[in-house]
Image (cartoon, helix red, strand yellow):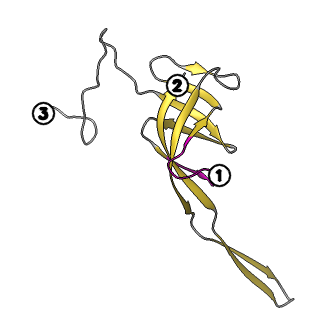
Amino acid sequence: MHRQDGPAAEAPSLGMNGQEILEMYAVVQAQGRQFKVSEGDELVVDRMDAEVGATIDFGQVLLIGGDATKIGAPFVDGAKVVAEVTGHQRGPKIDVYKYKRRQRYRKSIGFRAGQTTVRIQSIEG
């Protein structure tokens, strides 16, 4: 009996020389955090000052991977990731509770951070 790996084991797509074609991806730095992205991905970042439908560039690309990997020192020269802003929303509520014993002091505060959703259009470089 032949067993396949995974729920839907597919044959890898092969290039002209018979080697497997790897999907292009990039590691970008946005607002102090690093994200691994590829074309078509949706990414949720901290709130950005951009209109819905506007295109933005992530110029701080740390790595580009795929068939040939380029590693930056610290950034890859001439590389950028182009994304489109698809929406703004607020994140989950975070409850902050302050308490001081023997003082009858209790304080409850809620906080929701603003977030922006972007869709990666292209990876250049």
Residue for point 24% across, 27% down: 11
Q: Quadrant of residue 94?
A: bottom right
Tell me how far mark 2 sits from mark 1, CA to CA.
23 Å
Residue stretch in magenta: 43-55
Q: Amino acid at mark 3?
A: Met
Q: Compare marks 2 and 3 and give the one earlier in the sequence.
A: 3
Few, some or many residues within 10 Å of mark 2 (<14, 14–19, 20+): few
Residue annotated with mark 1: 49
Q: Secondary structure at mark 3?
A: loop
> Which numbered tag is attached to residue 1?
3
For marks 3 and 1, give the one nearer the viewer. Answer: 1
Q: Is residue 71 left or right of residue 123?
A: right
What type of secondary structure mainly makes up the magenta span? loop
Which residue type does callout 1 highlight?
A: Asp
The residue at 58%/29% (across/down) is: 80
The residue tagged with tag 1: helix, strand or loop? Answer: loop
Q: Is residue 73 left or right of residue 102?
A: left
* Labelled disc at residue 124: 2
Q: Earlier in the sequence, mark 2 or mark 1?
A: 1
Badge 1 density bin: few <14, some 14–19, many ≥20, Cα 10 Å:
few
Q: Which residue is at the front of the view, 95 or 99?
A: 95
SS for tag 2? strand
In this image, 122 relative to 114: left or right?
left
Residues at badges 3 and 1 in contact (C-beta under 8 Å)? no
Name the quadrant of the N terminus: top left
